[in-house]
Image (cartoon, rainbow, N blue to C red):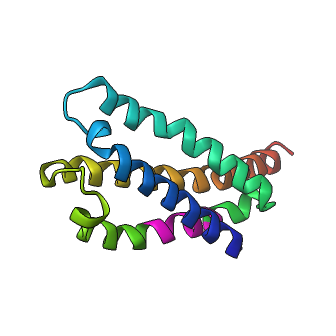
Amino acid sequence: MPLFAVIGFVVWLAATVVFRLWGAELLVPHTPLLWVTFIGVVPVVAFLLKLAFAWGKAAPADRPLAALLMALPGMLLDIVSTSFHRLVFPAIPASGLYLFSAWLLWAYSLILLGGILPAIRAKYRVSSKQNAG
């Protein structure tokens, strides 16, 4: 299971670099690119979760914990990165932090949801088979 925390750290580091370099362009209010940023993270997270679950051989019942372990490093490190946003994200103005914070909540919610959904699906498949028989 520690593998998932490492994957989460690597994903956090990559996203931090992206927002450090291009955050000011990605988080401009009322632009199509902002919507692309929010919508585009959905398939990216789905792909990364699918890859991580396969690589870590996580059974559906283990995926909520695996997703939590993937999300936690970034959630904890983003407390520091957003607190020191002038150093970490110098191109993002203070007025853009609300969009950045919203994007972070969205992305972490997708990770956690992506871990919970397979377990829910597995539970309902098992219970529907038991009820049918």
Q: Is residue 90 left or right of residue 11?
A: left
Q: Is residue 112 visible?
A: no
Q: Nearer the viewer, residue 69 or 27?
A: 27
Picture coordinates of residue 78 (x, y %)? 37, 67
What residue sits 31% from the left and 63% below the top? 88
User: Which secondary structure dominates the residues rendered in magenta?
Assistant: helix
Q: Is residue 112 left or right of residue 105?
A: right
What residue sits 81% from the left and 60% below the top? 57
What range of the chain is rendered magenta?
Answer: 65-74
Residue 125 vertical position relative to residue 66 in the rendered view, above or below: above
Residue 97 vertical position relative to residue 31 in the rendered view, above or below: below
What residue sits 67% from the left and 55% below the top? 119
Query: Which quarter of the rendering shows the C terminus?
Result: top right
Residue 124 vertical position relative to residue 16 in the rendered view, above or below: above
What residue sits 63% from the left and 69% below the top? 6
Whether 42 is among the magenta residues is no
Number of numbered discs visible in the structure rendering: 0
Q: Is residue 42 left or right of residue 82?
A: right
Whether 72 is among the magenta residues is yes
Picture coordinates of residue 92 (x, y %)? 23, 50
Picture coordinates of residue 114 (x, y %)? 58, 50
